[in-house]
Image (cartoon, coloured by chain):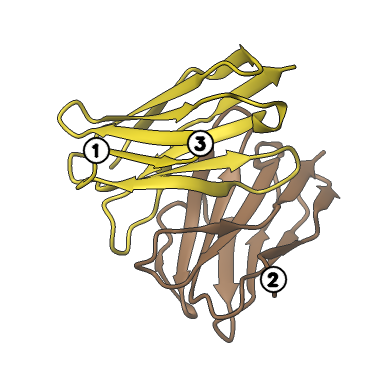
């Protein structure tokens, strides 16, 4: 089955800096790659997703890039703010009916 | 409802007791998922429902775990003879259909087995 590796496990940045979280996947058939943000005491919330026919997608301060050949994808957050502090999860699936396989998460801490 | 609702939010139980966790998905969502989140382990898939049927039970860790969904809406996850290693946050998510990958999660049930 699919295996998703996520790095780093923790990331500390200063407010205004950029943050990058990277994930690799094992199943070349995977074609859907979402990112979820989980704040303390809450469930994960979808923040951005990308499909394998697209190399990059942006939404304001966040962007996701995908390299199908290398089987890795990354989340980029620019101009970080304290409210960006949370645990971020990447995931992958082969689409259609298929359960998501999640990475182990990255705890992002943004210091004022 | 406005979002996925889970109850209870916290459950403390003694080893060997049975527990039931409830999930009320977003109205109109036909697909429902249970995940388990252990400290530092990410989200572990348990079971998926499409309507009332469960096409994928592959993630249930043992026969002590079972789940049902009635009326295509509310789902209950039951853990029998709880063990300390069952302590985790149990998350429920729903999506519009089985082919819609966008999951909406509830806030979870924190289960502590003493």
Tally of numbered tags? 3
Residue topped by disc 2: B2
Q: Label 1, secondary structure: give it.
A: loop
The residue mark sitting in front, 1 or 3, is: 1
Residue topped by disc 3: A89
Chain A color in figure: yellow
Distance Cα–Cα, label 3 vs label 2: 23 Å
How far from the left and from the top, in percent, is residue B16?
A: 76, 49
In the rendered view, would you say A55 is above or below B8?
Answer: above
Residue topped by disc 1: A55
Pointer 2 with pointer 1, Cβ within 8 A: no
Image quadrant in which you'd find residue A21: top left
Report the chain shown in brown: B
Both marks 3 and 2 on one chain: no
Taking depth in this image into account, of B34 and A39 the one nearest to the observer is A39
Distance Cα–Cα, label 1 vs label 3: 19 Å
Pointer 1 with pointer 3, Cβ within 8 A: no
Disc 2 is attached to a residue of which chain?
B
Query: Which residue is found at the position 78% from the left and 42% from the top?
Result: B112
How far from the left and from the top, in percent, is residue A50?
A: 33, 46
How far from the left and from the top, in percent, is residue B7?
A: 77, 62
Both marks 1 and 3 on one chain: yes
Query: Which residue is found at the position 22% from the left and 39% from the top?
Result: A27
Distance Cα–Cα, label 2 vs label 1: 33 Å
- Is B16 placed left or right of A61 in the picture? right
């Amino acid at each position: 089955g699919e295996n998703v590796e996520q790095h780093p496990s923790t990331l500390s940045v200063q407010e205004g800096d950029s943050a990058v979280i990277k994930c690799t996947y094992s199943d070349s058939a995977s074609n859907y790659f979402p990112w979820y943000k989980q704040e303390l005491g809450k469930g994960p919330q979808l923040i951005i997703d990308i499909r394998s026919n697209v190399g990059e997608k942006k939404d304001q301060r966040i962007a996701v890039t995908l390299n199908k050949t290398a089987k890795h994808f990354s989340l980029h957050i620019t101009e970080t703010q304290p409210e960006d502090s949370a645990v971020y999860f990447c995931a992958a699936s082969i689409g259609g009916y298929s359960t998501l396989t999640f990475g182990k998460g990255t705890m992002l801490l943004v210091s004022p | 409802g406005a979002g996925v609702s889970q109850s209870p939010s916290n459950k403390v139980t003694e080893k060997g007791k049975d527990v039931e966790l409830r999930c009320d998905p977003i109205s109109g969502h036909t697909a429902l998922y249970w995940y388990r989140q252990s400290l530092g382990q990410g989200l572990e898939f348990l079971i998926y429902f499409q309507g009332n049927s469960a096409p994928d039970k592959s993630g249930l860790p043992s026969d002590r775990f079972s789940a049902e969904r009635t009326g295509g809406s509310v789902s209950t996850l039951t853990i029998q003879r709880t063990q300390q290693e069952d302590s985790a946050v149990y998350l429920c998510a729903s999506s519009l259909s089985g082919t819609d990958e966008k999951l909406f999660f509830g806030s979870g049930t924190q289960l502590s087995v003493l």
